Image (cartoon, rainbow, N blue to C red):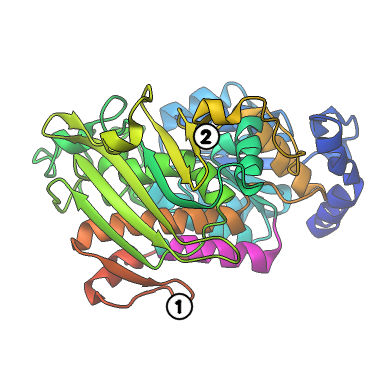
Amino acid sequence: MKRQTNRRQFVKQSAIAGLGFWAAGGLTLADSKSPNETVNIACIGVGGKGDSDTDQAANFGNIVALCDIDDSTLNDKAGKFPKAKKYNDFRKMLEEMDKSIDAVTVSTPDHTHAVASIMAMKMGKHVYCQKPLTHSVYEARMMREVAAKQKVATQMGNQGTAENGLRRAVEIIQAGAIGPVRQVHVWTNRPTGFWSQAPQVTSRPKETPGIPNHIHWYLFLGPAPDRPYHPAYHPFAWRGWWDFGTGALGDMACHTANMAFRALKLGYPTSIVAESGEINPETYPAWAKIHFDFPAREELPPVKFTWYEGKKDGQRVLPSADLTKGLQMSDSGSLLVGDKGILFSPNDYGDAYKLLPEKDFEGYEGPKPTLPRNGRGDDGMKAEWVAAIKGGPPAMSNFDYAAMLTETILLGNVAMRVGKKIEWDGPHMKVTNCPEAEQYIKPEFRKGWHL
């Protein structure tokens, strides 16, 4: 094919078989022997989660380019994909390889998700982006709008979405097994237990060591405000810093709140209020408890959604003992409280659950399945995405859904920073009672970076 647009049309038309992905119980489109059916994928961020994202994308396409701001990480991954071109700057990669790239994965720190993804989508590239979809509310809104306008296939990497247990829980809730749900409680073990830099660090390092030769620091900063290099930020500790990460809420709620959000068809909340540990200008607090109020939706009643994270005075912040009485509480999980019962999910991903009280649900078989089945976690997420690229149905965590989920979750961080209840006008993307919140809804970008 002489033109990439023709090639994309061929890829899409030739893969109507992607529609068979669900019915066949997981047909892998990479099984095709025709090179014309191969999706050419560039991977932005190939360390950390990007390591597995790149390997999994290779199961369903051809890795033609690798991009990372850390040469050590980049060269390690290039050893597995020696034919892929190497870049440090995704902007240069997309410009130089435009006609050779069909799709990109974005597995960078949170603050560069949107700038990379939106540039790629505006060039007609399909995008798989890690959770949380963005660093700010405004970016999430833009991701949803650009994806819709460009008509590209998208997927956010909250892998619990691909698990059949989550899909079954959604079907059971929507079938009314526990009755109308008016309360949701979701908790995580973060920031303790897995990453914990935020509770210990409350100010920038004073030391200014030289930038290592293998790190392209200003590309790491991307749209974030300028600051000197320090190993406190790279390669992993960025998650607890306001400028780079989204804290425990952004890190985990796209996983742990996902099942409830989908099952209850939650959209824009009307108000959000947060209690938290001390707020400082640099890092996320050691604990938080955040309430989201959602209005009635169609036939569904209003919902009060509460998020719990971290430790306060040495004790985990969790739902009340009255609510969890008799439960063997999990390290992270969720409770959906209905008029007829409770659905308890005891893990990060919403893919395991039990209905309570158990005696009331003995012998309950549930409704007939209404959602397609996958059951392959991270790998299945890439399979759904590539199937969508090739003309199949939209992936389940496509940006239309994932951006709404992310936008809602990130409002919790806004409420933490302003320190009072915020009233949210979702359709107009506006906090109506608190002008100082605007700086957190739509932060400024460093010169040279834009959406």
Pick whichever, 297 or 11, lies toward us. 297
Residue type at mark 2: give it.
Gly
Residue 38 spot, x, y in % from top left = 81, 38
Pick whichever, 275 or 171, lies toward us. 171
In the image: residue 53, left or right of residue 441: right
Q: Which residue is mark 2?
A: 350
Residue 397 spot, x, y in % from top left = 61, 47
What is the magenta range?
138-152
In the image: residue 79, left or right of residue 436: right
Report, in whole angstroms, how far the alpha carbon at label 1 lies from the one at label 2: 31 Å
- Residue at 43%, 32% (x, y): give it: 71
Pick whichever, 292 or 390, lies toward us. 292
The quarter of the displayed image where residue 299 is located: bottom right
- Badge 2: how crowded within 10 Å, few (<14), some, or many (20+)? many
In the image: residue 184, left or right of residue 90: left
Label for residue 364?
none
Q: Is residue 146 magenta?
A: yes
The kind of secondary structure element at disc 2 is loop
- Badge 1: how crowded within 10 Å, few (<14), some, or many (20+)? few
Label for residue 428?
1
- Residue at 52%, 50% (x, y): give it: 261
Residue 147 spot, x, y in % from top left = 63, 61
